[in-house]
Image (cartoon, rainbow, N blue to C red):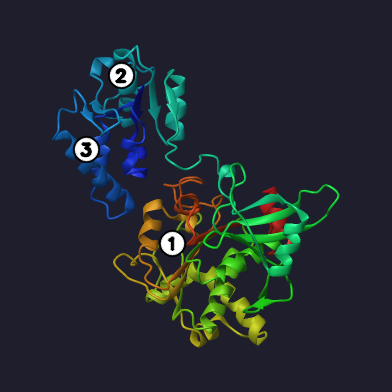
Amino acid sequence: MNYVLDTNVLLHDPQSLFTFGANDVYLPIYIFDELDKFKKELSQRGKSARDVIRKIESMRQTGSLATGVSLGEGLGKLFVAYAKTEELNVPFESNIRIMDNAILATVKTIMERNPDKETIFVTMDVNLRLRADALAIKVEDYEGEAPRNIEEHYTGFQSVFINSEQIDTLYRDSHVEWENTEGNEIYPNEFVFLKSSDETSSHSGNARYIKDKGILKVVTFSKKRAHSGIRARNIEQSFAFDILLDPEVRLITLVGKAGTGKTLLAIAAGLEAMESDQYKTLVVSRPIFPMGREMGFLPGDVDAKLTPWMQPIYDNLELIAQLKNGLGATFKEVIEKENIRIEPLTYIRGRSLPNQYIIVDEAQNLTPHEVKTIITRCGDGTKIVLTGDPYQIDNPYVDSTNNGLSYVVERFKKESVAAHITLMKGERSQLAELASNLL
C-alpha cells in the first residue's frame, strides 16, 4: 500500500513518516516549497518544518529519494514524487504553481504508475479531502495515535459491578482491595461508580483506583465542605477536588464544556494547597488566542496588555475573594495576599519551575509540542493542572482530537502520577447550561 502525505500532516506530526508500518510513504516534491516557507517561523509550525527537513535529509544520505530510502526496520520506504506538466490531468485549473493541484496531480500520477498497489492520500485539509474524493482518489484524515472521534476519548470514570460485601468494606475501611482482570480494567486514578452485582441490592458507592496500593479509595460527595469558599455541586466536581488536592498526583487534566467549573475548581484547590504550604507559588496562565477578530495592539506595560486575556482568571479569583471576604472584595486583594502569579505562556521555554502549583487554562488551544514544552518545565514538587474544552478551539492548527489537551489525556491515562476527569454538568447557571446544550 502507498501513502501520500500532505504538508499539513508533516507540520502537525513530524514523526508521521514512521506511522504507516511496512507501507511505502510518498511525499509530493511540491511540499518542500511549503516547508521552506514555514521553516523560518519561530512558532511550533516552524520548528516542525525544520524537524521534518532534517529527518528527510538524514534519510537522503542513505540512498536516493527517487528510488526510495528505508524508513527503518520493519517499515517501508520513503519516496519523493512529482507530476510532470503533461501529467497534471485534473478537471479544473491545473497551474503547476497552485500547490494543492500539483499535489493532487502527483497522487494521480502515483496511482497510475502503481496500479497493483492501493494508493491513499493523507491530508488534514477538509477541502482537499473533498477535492481528492471527487477525483476518485482514496483519501483519509491523519489519525496518528489518538482516537479521531472525540466521543472515544478517555473520560476518567466508569461504572463497575462488585458484590455488596465489597461496597460495605469500602465504606467501613475507606478502601477495598482491587485487582484488574481482563475485560474489567481500571486505569490509575480513574474514578468508578460502584454498583452491586446483586440484582436485589441497591448498594452503590464512589471510589478512585490507587494503582500503587491496589485499592479503590472511597470518594464522598459533600455539598457542605468548601475549598477556598467553593463547594462541589455534583459528583464529578467532587472527583475533581479529590485529585486536585492529592499531592501524589502531579499532572491533572480537567475537560468539560463551558460552565462546568474547570478553572474555578482548579484555582480554589490551588489556593487551599497554598494555605497548607505544599507549594511556594500558584501560577495561572492561558494561551493567547482571540475569539473572533483581533483588536490590534494593546497599550500599556505587560500587565496592562495581559489583562484582557487573563480577565477570565481574574473573574474566578474575584468570586473566591467575595465568597471568603464578602462583597466588595477584589481579585487584586487575593493576588496580594497569596503568592499568585498570572503569566503568559509565551516565555516559558528554558525555565524550571519547582514546588509550584501551575494551572494552564484553555489548554485545548495548545499543540502537543507546546504542551510537552510546558510540562517539561515542571521541577520537583510541582503540580500542573490543564483545563479546557476540546469543543471550543480558537487555534486554527488543531482540532478537537489532535490538540495538546486531548493528547495529554490519552498519553498519560495509564500513569500513576496523572489523573483526569471529564466534567459533564454545567453549574454556571441554568441559562448557560441550556446555551451549551442547545446552541
The answer for how far apart the CA atoms under marks 3 and 2 are is 20 Å
Q: Tag 1, which secondary structure? A: loop
**Image quadrant in which the N terminus is located:** top left
Query: Residue 243 lies in what quarter of the image?
Result: bottom right
Tell which tag, 3 or 2, sits nearer the viewer: 3
The answer for how far apart the CA atoms under marks 1 and 2 are is 42 Å
The tag on residue 33 is none
Q: Position of residue 297 (x, y in %)?
A: 39, 65
Q: Position of residue 48 (x, y in %)?
A: 30, 47
Q: Position of residue 139 (x, y in %)?
A: 43, 26
Tell which tag, 1 or 2, sits nearer the viewer: 2
- Residue at 46% x, 20% y is 134
Residue tagged by mark 2? 110
Decide which of tag 3 and tag 2 comes sooner along the chain: 3
Above or below residue 97? Residue 316 is: below
Which amino acid type is shown beneath numbered disc 3? Ile
Q: Tag 3, which secondary structure? A: helix
Left or right: where 42 falls relative to 436: left
Which amino acid type is shown beneath numbered disc 2? Ile
The tag on residue 56 is 3
Q: Which residue is nearer to you in this view: 334 or 91?
A: 334
- Residue at 53% x, 83% y is 276
Decide which of tag 1 and tag 2 comes sooner along the chain: 2
Mark 1 Cα-neighbour bin, 10 Å: few <14, some 14–19, many ≥20: some
Tell which tag, 3 or 1, sits nearer the viewer: 3
Q: Tag 2, which secondary structure? A: helix
- Counting the numbered discs, the total is 3
Residue tagged by mark 1? 288
Residue that protrudes farthest toward the right in the picture? 200
Decide which of tag 3 and tag 1 comes sooner along the chain: 3
Q: Position of residue 65 (x, y in %)?
A: 19, 28
